[in-house]
Image (spheres, grey):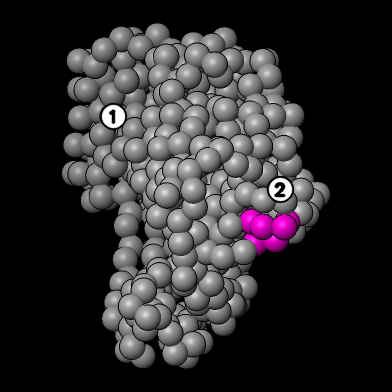
Amino acid sequence: MDDAIAFTCGLLEKQAAKQWEVFHKDSHSFRVEFKYGVMDTLQKARVSGLAVRVIRESRMGFSFTSALDASSLQKTVDTALSMAGVMPLDPDATLAVLAPLPVLQEKIMDPSLRRATEADKTEIARVIEKKARLEDKRITTIRSAGYSDTIVAIRLVNSSGLDATGEAGFVSAWVQLMAEQNGEQEMAYWMEQARSPERINPETVASKAARRALDSLGGKSLPSARMPVIVENSVAVDLLQVLSHSFLAENHFKKLTSPRIKLDELIFSRKISIVDDGLDARGDSTFPFDGEGTPSQRTQVVENGTLRSLLLDLSYARKFKATSTGNCRRGSFEGLPVNGVTNLLIEPGTSTVEELAAAVGSGLLVTELMGLHTANPVSGDFSVGASGFKIKDGRPGHPVKGIAIAGNLVDLFGSVLDVADDFRFFGNMGAPSLLVEALSVSGL
């Protein structure tokens, strides 16, 4: 890898390219799934490649290759230089400069992940599937039970003197299952994520998924009404995923966000504080630097309901006459870097979910939304299917299904009365449960 990068840098210097960048990514992944006590899926992969970006007279050229021989690297450089001659002008195109990087290696690359054998990892998936099947006779189907991990190594070198390297490993384990009773079927899912397989508890993954499915049996609808709603942490993460569109500088520049979301204005409940944190090792997007080489950082996006900062990469930072917040994402060496979130999270409160339910008295606990992908990320309007539990006398009661919830994301986050302490990360998004003053529920 290092030889290929050095060779490519040398080619660019010989071509008298004044502004250039070489990006190399190498990833190893492992995935195993079980069904009915038998291994159903086993996947092992290594993906490695190099990308070149060149800026010539404010025009960006880009090319990539997965072959690291001299001929392929020469062709990649030539293509990037050629592309720079025909691409549209972008006066804000720029490259990162050398800056100190945060020390994260011990937090995001657990040595035990390298030591874990395939047998160790396979056993986690096997135990999850077996435990889930044996949890209750009403658990009739295991749709998917598995374990996966990824180790990623990145090096980024550019003409500004930047030479950044980093490595991270991430692990997840999950089960999706079905419970049946009296002809009724209910699906449930649970997962855990960590930096090491040693931190995954397969029994917990299985039992929590089973309990969620079993508790949902016997669900019934509710009369249509506006009512207080507790949004479970996993659902709050789904809502945050849609809302995240509104925090990206690119979308503000292109006017693809709600005009109600403005810097330094109170737009949400004072109970809501949102952070983008590329340094939080609990999320799966933690890394020392972003897709351009800017050091990762913690950015207070929303503070007590007020929008304090947009999320900026280098290009949009220049457009907004600001500084990059380290929010350039690069999923693969095959694509250009783009403006995006790192680990986005709603900061937890101090109340328990039980205290939120007691405060509601009578309302709804939402544990799942269906069709949230249809929500409008610009206006924030949504109308989706939902399920959960009726809250009666301050406690969760019978399961609820066959209802729909409609509203607006800005209004929803603006009417949050309290925030629970049950924070969890799901991938690169994290949230606690939220108590919303009222939502429109359509049922019977």
* 94 with respect to 162 (left or right): left
Query: Residue type at mark 2?
Result: Val
Q: Residue at x 67, y 50 (%)?
A: 362
Does dot 2 land on a helix, a strand or a loop?
helix
Q: Is residue 352 magenta?
A: no
| Residue 358, numbered label | none
The nearer-to-camera label among 2 and 1 is: 2
Does dot 1 land on a helix, a strand or a loop?
strand
The percent position of residue 80, horizontal first and vertical second, equals 25, 28
Q: Is residue 392 magenta?
A: yes
Q: Is residue 47 above or below residue 321?
A: below
Extreme residue toward the right, this view: 350
Q: Which residue is mark 1?
A: 62
* 362 with respect to 442 (left or right): right
Q: Is residue 314 above or below residue 295?
A: above
Q: Which residue is mark 2?
A: 360
The percent position of residue 108, horizontal first and vertical second, equals 60, 57
Q: Residue at x 54, y 16 (%)?
A: 260
Q: How many other residues sit within 10 Å of disc 1, few (<14), some (14-19) or many (≥20)?
A: many
Of the pair 197 and 234, the residue shown nearer to us: 234
Across the whole image, how many numbered discs are drawn on residues?
Answer: 2
Residue 310, by quadrant, is top right
User: Pointer 2 and pointer 1: residues touching (CB < 8 Å)?
Assistant: no
Q: What span is colored magenta in the figure? A: 391-396
Of the pair 153 and 81, the residue shown nearer to us: 153
The percent position of residue 94, horizontal first and vertical second, equals 45, 19
Q: Residue at x 71, y 48 (%)?
A: 360
Q: Residue at x 20, y 22 (%)?
A: 82
* 322 with respect to 35 (left or right): right
Residue 192 in view of the camera: yes
Query: Residue type at mark 1?
Result: Phe
